[in-house]
Amino acid sequence: SVESFRVPRQAEEEEGTLTKITGTVKSYYDSAVNTVSGYVDSIKGLKLEEKAKNLYDETTTVLGTYAGIAQDQLYHFFHH
């Protein structure tokens, strides 16, 4: 009669261990997903695409201005 109680108990302990392992793995997975989601939100928050576009626009404006100045200098140098 004692052994009849040991088998269910052992099954319960194994189930408990499996549940603990599953819970731990799920916890690590959830933590990793949350961390990655946080990084993605941070990157979106930085608006990198917008910053890159603004940098390009500002650079082309500055280069256009300097190219215009250089063109004027060359024109006046050769025509005067």
Image: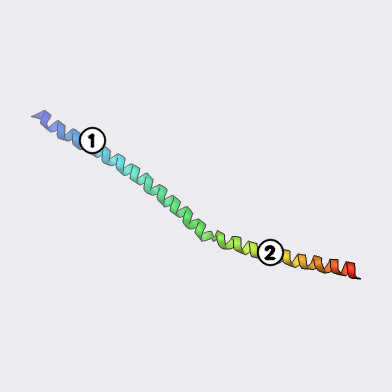
Q: Which residue is mark 2?
A: 60
Q: Position of residue 77 (x, y in %)?
A: 89, 67
Q: Position of residue 11 (x, y in %)?
A: 19, 35
Residue density around tag 2, few if under 14, some if 14–19, many if 20 or more, within 10 Å: few
Farthest left residue?
Answer: 1
Does label 1 or label 2 sit earlier along the sequence? 1
Circle on res. 52: none
- Quadrant assignment for the N terminus: top left
Q: Which residue is mark 1?
A: 14
Q: Amino acid at mark 1?
A: Glu
Rendered view: 64 above or below 19: below
Q: Kindly check if marks 1 and 2 are in contact, taking CB atoms under 8 A apart as contact.
A: no
**Which residue is depicted at the point 50% across and 56% down?**
42
- How many numbered discs? 2
**Which residue is depicted at the point 81% across and 65% down?**
70
**Which residue is depicted at the point 17% across and 35% down?**
9
Q: Quick one: 23 or 49, which is closer to the camera? A: 49
Q: Amino acid at mark 2?
A: Thr
Cα separation, mark 1 vs mark 2, equals 67 Å
Q: Quick one: 24 or 59, which is closer to the camera? A: 59
Q: In the drawing, does residue 79 fall left or right of residue 7?
A: right
